[in-house]
Amino acid sequence: QVQLVESGGGLVQAGGSLRLSCAASGRTFSGGAIGWFRQAPGKEREFVAAITWSGVITYYADSVKGRFTISRDRTKNTMYLQMNSLKPEDTAIYYCADQSRVRTVVAENDYDYWGQGTQVTVSS
């Protein structure tokens, strides 16, 4: 029943910023977490960031720590990934995912629902 729709991707020059959105619907359970993953061409999907449903605790991959910020707007039922100081290596398809209860937030196999992704391209 949970549906996730990503938006906000696009083309940006290195050093620029983008804000990704993930609109969630049909989430009737409490707890758990929402995460962002990305997959670059020819590479495996990797963890980017996550936030508990309460919004109290956040997690970041070392590669994006200090540059990306994850947040959630409860009134809009939408999660955001603010990406600053973008680098060409950030180029990937970005996916949001829903973990109905907290297990391992960095493990993609522990997530229950996935969006279809939004493309982010960073030029040099």
Image: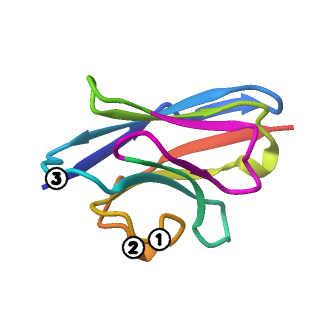
Q: Residue furthest front?
A: 56
Mark-to-mark CA distance, 2 and 3: 16 Å
- 2 part of magenta stretch: no
Q: Magenta part of the protein: which range?
A: 53-71
Comes first in the chain, label 1 or label 2? 1
Mark-to-mark CA distance, 1 and 2: 6 Å
Q: Residue at 45% across / 41% down in the picture?
A: 56
Q: Are marks 1 and 3 in contact (CB under 8 Å)?
A: no
Whether residue 64 sits left or right of residue 75 in the image: it is right
User: Of the numbered discs in the image, which one, if any, rests on residue 29?
Assistant: 3
Q: Which residue is mark 2?
A: 110
Q: Quick one: SS at disc 3?
A: loop
At which x and y percent is residue 65?
A: 73, 46
At which x and y percent is residue 79?
A: 40, 36
Q: Residue at 34% across / 46% down in the picture?
A: 53
| Above or below: residue 12 compared with residue 6 | above
| Above or below: residue 12 compared with residue 97 | above
At which x and y percent is residue 76?
A: 28, 25
**Which quadrant, please, contains the N terminus?**
bottom left
Q: Residue furthest bottom?
A: 109
Quarter occupied by residue 6: top left
Q: Are marks 1 and 2 in contact (CB under 8 Å)?
A: yes
Looking at the picture, which amino acid does disc 1 mark? Answer: Thr
Looking at the picture, which amino acid does disc 2 mark? Answer: Asp
Quick one: 80 or 104, which is closer to the camera?
Answer: 104
Determine crowd level at label 3: few under 14, some 14-19, many 20+ residues with C-alpha closer than 10 A.
few
Q: Residue at 74% across / 37% down in the picture?
A: 67
Comes first in the chain, label 1 or label 3? 3
Q: Which residue is mark 1?
A: 104
Looking at the picture, which amino acid does disc 3 mark? Answer: Phe
